[in-house]
Amino acid sequence: MNARGFSLVELLLASALMAAGLALAFGILQGAMRATASAERLASHTDQLRSVQGLLRRHLADALPQAIDPAAGIDELRLLRLDPERVEFVGLMPGTLARGGVYVQVFRLERRSNGLALLFEYRMLTPEGVLPAMRPPELLLEGLAEARFSARGFDPDGRPGPWRDRWERLGELPLQVRLEAGFAEPRWRFPTVVVPLRHSLSGLVGLLPEAMRRDPRGEDET
């Protein structure tokens, strides 16, 4: 039996096949790692979005029929301020987030280099007025391409009215508050948040005093 070693051509061919196999395996591994990382980012984003929307729902739903400015007279009694970029109201804060008690709470949108950011801030409300904020605003979300708040109440005929980008009614909470938004990242979705306010008197607007039913723009809400 004649023993023969490998020729140089055979060694080069084997090395080339091995290198090609390793490159293929490495590419597959890299693709799997990228897919896993992308899935983890999407899952983390979904969890964060679910948490933020839960926070919005809890705090807005429990908005109290209490004046934002304790010194306001009946002709300027505002229970909630809303425009496309912010919503401000009075509500209770749990002890896990603050000292507990009644706070003026604000969800607002802020333009940043990477798009719109959703912030949450709160200040304690006392009989003497609103105290300075104890901590900087909390960043809830960023990277929004567009976002806007709106609200609606009942029309005089008792039906839900149209959505408005400003809430002007005095002495009254809206029936619902809505936040519509979209992310710059096309894979991410922001389901529209519609929050019914538990303490809304919008359906009883006809029972409120005339001064409280008057729209500041000069229109009678009834």
Image (tube, rainbow, N blue to C red):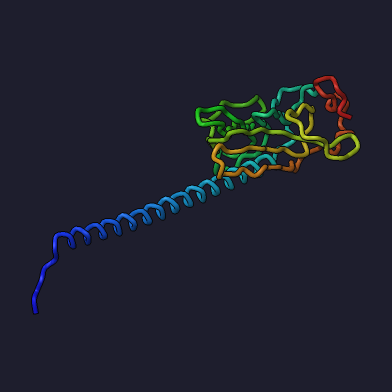
Q: Residue at x 91, y 37 (%)?
A: 157
Residue 92 location, quadrant: top right
Q: Looking at the image, which residue sits at the far top?
A: 218
Q: Position of residue 77 (x, y in %)?
A: 76, 25
Residue 168 in view (yes/no): yes
Nearest the eye: 4 or 79: 4
How far across and down, in percent of the image, does residue 59 sit? 65, 41
Say which quadrant the C terminus sits in: top right
**Residue 83 image offset from top left, x and y in percent:** 69, 28
At a point 77% along the width and 34% down the height, the residue shown is 163
Q: Quadrant of the N terminus?
A: bottom left
Whole-percent x, y for residue 115 in the image: 54, 31
Q: Find residue 219 and report its image quarter.
A: top right
Of 55 and 159, the residue lying toward us: 159
The one nearer the camera, 28 or 8, is 8
Horizontal placement of 18 versus 144: left or right?
left
**Residue at point 19% right, 58% down?**
12
Determine whether, in the image, residue 75 is placed left or right of residue 41.
Answer: right
On the rendered structure, is 19 left or right of 58? left
In the rendered image, which quarter is residue 133 located in?
Answer: top right
